[in-house]
Amino acid sequence: MPNVKLKTEFLVRKRDGRIQPLRASKLARSIHAALAGSSALDLAASMDVAESALAAVAGRRDRPVSTGELADSVVCALGDAGMPGAAERYQREALTRRRRRDKWRSQTRSFMLECTD
């Protein structure tokens, strides 16, 4: 990955409620990983998309940005960069991750209930 200055001026609210600093480099790696194999983006282009997505939410610094808002911003940035296929793939990957997480939580809850009976 190119030498990138860490950007921590943004805060992100994780799905579990935690608030953490957000770095453009971490977001770029997430974008690149979600699109791996599509050859739509190299790592440098992923960084450009991440910076565009962060610029779109820059006006919301008064509160943490939710992961959902950030994902929507990435999809828009991919579309604005002329990569609608990559935007669709990113959305599909996000949906797959959400379903996998929901299934895991459901199974964990069921297991916990069985343990308390």
Image (spheres, grey):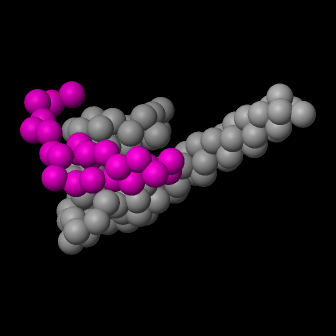
* Residue 93 at x, y percent in the picture: 55, 45
Q: Measured along the vertical axis of the image, is residue 40 above or below residue 66?
A: above
Residue drawn at x 77%, y 34% as measured from the top left? 112
Image quadrant occupied by the N terminus: top left
Can residue 23 be found in the magenta stretch? yes
Q: Tell me if 59 is positioned left or right of 98 in this view.
A: left
Q: Position of residue 6 (x, y in %)?
A: 14, 39
Region in magenta = 1-24
Nearest the viewer among 38 and 106 is 106
Residue 59 visible in the snapshot: yes
Which residue is outermost to the right? 117
At a point 27% along the width and 53% down the height, the residue shown is: 11
The answer to whether 29 is drawn above or below residue 78 in the figure is above
Count up the numbered dots. 0
Residue 89 location (% of width, % of height): 52, 50
- Classify residue 99 as left or right of residue 113: left
Left or right, 73 with respect to 110, comes to left
* Residue 20 versus residue 69 in the image, above or below: above
- Residue at screen point 75% across, 40% down: 109
The C terminus - image quarter: top right
Residue 9 covered by magenta stretch: yes
x then y, percent, for residue 68:
46, 59
